Image (cartoon, rainbow, N blue to C red):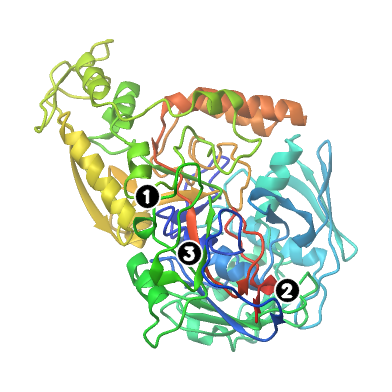
Amino acid sequence: MLRAPRRGSGRGGRAILVAAAGAALALIAAACGPAGADSSAGSVGTTPVSGSTASYAEEPGLSVNYIFPFVNPNYIDVSNTDDFQYLMYRPLYWFGQGTQPYLNKSLSLADKPVISGRQVTIKLKNYTWSNGQPVTAQNVLFWINMQLGLANSPNEYGGTVSGDFPFNVTNLRAVGTDEVTMTMDKQYSAEWFTDNELSQITPMPEAWDRTSATATSDCSSKPADCPAVYKYLDSQSAGKASSWASSPLWSVVDGPWKLLSATADGYAKLGINPHYAGPVAAHHISTFILQPYTSEQAEFNVLQDPQGGQPIDVGYLPTVDAPQPPPGETAGGNPSTLANYKLTVLYPWALTYFPYNYRDPKAGPIFSQLYFRQAFQSLIDQEGIINGPLHGYGKPTIGPVTSYPATNYLAPAVAKAGDRWELNLAYAEKRLKEHGWSVVPNGVDRCVSPGSGPSDCGPGVPRNAELKLSMIYASGVDYMYSATKELVSNASLVGVHITATAEPIGNIFGAAFCTPAAGQPPCPGWQLADWGAWTYSPDYLPTGEELFESNSNADAGFFNNATDNALITKTVESRSTKAFYAAMYKWQEMLSPYLPEVYQPNVPTLVETVNNLHIGPQSSTLTINPETWYFLK
């Protein structure tokens, strides 16, 4: 989701943060209609109605607060990107075909790239900006040059990675008005380069190429001009919500929507852009409202009874309030208080986990020990969370690639092995005792055998080190509170003392992804940080560089393993589709049992859509297409 400052170098780090998966995720994925079980009350008409207004609940704690699609690292979250910016400023390539996270050619601004050896050709379709100008190859170069011009700047695009795109291409050229060509610095997997490199581009209009309201620039041709342009555009985005709709910058759009109004608390009202060249429903809504909420309970209260406030046409059902699905069913019935809504279930294309901070001076050496990670994972009761606070919804996370929704990206051997780390307190206690810890149930374990031997606590763990850990987790999500409480209880039974503190999700991101500037105070310390999930966007292939490669910007805990790095490199540099999948599967088979992070259940979105609103197929990528929605009478 995501207010997560980026940092470091290496190939990775463009995935977008999402807050506590599941109930909260429903707010960001509640987009597009019946993809799972459907439970509705009453009947509705069959005649489409044009010109209506639909309201959509934003994710608690991640409300709209940034409009510039070259997103400042502090604002790169799904509420700003998928739910808001993508509606007005279309990415070059669109991903999501129903519940599958694959390239959607029909909604992309360009044809699928032609990649031959190291040569890449992008052919644009016939789209226009709302000011009448065409979307051109130069608009694509504007985005790329902005990244080049801000290389290694603290104000770079939140998905920029040193050494990665566009730093791994040369000979960037606009051929005429509708074609871009480039040469890769080496041959990469065509799948990877399309889905994880070119996927991040959002063309930008010439109207934005300026350094003030009166001074134009040439960033679209000269990277050296871009820092000043970025400084101006960023200043007109952050903290300026009330002026966005009237801005001559942000009113130039190529997507199906234009902004009508916005407020500082995250409320946004959008209307149809009549100049949009892509597909729009023949009968559609004309106004789309994004409504902010501070917690999932606040949203659920309004969903049940608006009480004079803005009603919710598309919202979500917190899993703690969801009826248990009957045996063999994917969904239970709706609560009686939601008789006017239909329920659908969708699993997001995201990885649900929380990281260890390997650089924490006290806990880092402990986290670096595989035996400890095996013991700690055995304290996580994924099935208990699914059957308890998640009320039967959820799938265990079994490795670095999510197992649901089903894709051909998951290694068959990993899928067959399933969840290898079910709740097992006896195993956790055994692993700790075997490695030099004095286990004190309901007390605090101590290292009594420091050293690097097979029965010692491990390198860097001093004598009398205690298993007293701190954990911060996202507030406002009921199931997460219950899951954290259970973990604290389970851990105490084997002498692992965890002090868990609920914090607003912005605080979690601020701590976990903090990089202090020169002369600024040090970052707040943390050992375990749980925000919920990380969606694969705008890097849609789960090839590992986003979260697990050494120095990845998105690796909050600084995980580093040489074998992992080598397998990731082999995957992304594969020269055929067959070699690509073979390498990616081998990487998963190595990393899944290595437990680089703490696996948690993948939680679905329980989408509530008012009965007479048609919203079509739902996307697991969390992108939404309200221009295809319409009411029935």
Real-space Cα separation, disc 3 to disc 2, in angstroms: 25 Å
Which residue occupies the foreground of this view, 348 or 453?
348
Whole-percent x and y of residue 57? Answer: 47, 71
Secondary structure beneath dot 1 equals loop
Real-space Cα separation, disc 1 to disc 2, in angstroms: 40 Å
Instruction: Tell me the crowding category of disc 2: few under 14, some 14 to 19, or many 20 or more residues within 10 angstroms, Cα based.
Output: many
Real-space Cα separation, disc 1 to disc 3, in angstroms: 16 Å
Q: Nearer the viewer, mark 3 or mark 2?
A: 3
Residue drawn 73% across the image and 46% down it: 194
Whole-percent x and y of residue 165? Answer: 66, 48
Instruction: Tell me the crowding category of disc 1: few under 14, some 14 to 19, or many 20 or more residues within 10 angstroms, Cα based.
Output: many
Q: Please, is residue 293 above or below residue 39 in the view?
A: below
Identify the mark at residue 27; answer none if there is no mark.
3
Q: Tell me whether circle 1 and circle 2 mark residues in contact (CB < 8 Å).
A: no
Residue drawn 73% across the image and 36% down it: 188
Residue drawn 46% across the image and 71% down it: 339
Which residue occupies the foreground of this view, 41 or 427?
41
Q: Which residue is mark 1?
A: 390
Q: Is residue 270 visible?
A: yes
Check disc 2 and give the amino acid type: Asp
Whole-percent x and y of residue 548? Answer: 49, 36
Q: Please, is residue 26 above or below residue 43 in the view?
A: above
Identify the mark at residue 217; answer none if there is no mark.
none
Q: Which residue is mark 2?
A: 254
Check disc 1 and give the amino acid type: Leu
Whole-percent x and y of residue 487? Answer: 25, 40
Secondary structure beneath dot 3 equals helix
Check disc 3 and give the amino acid type: Leu
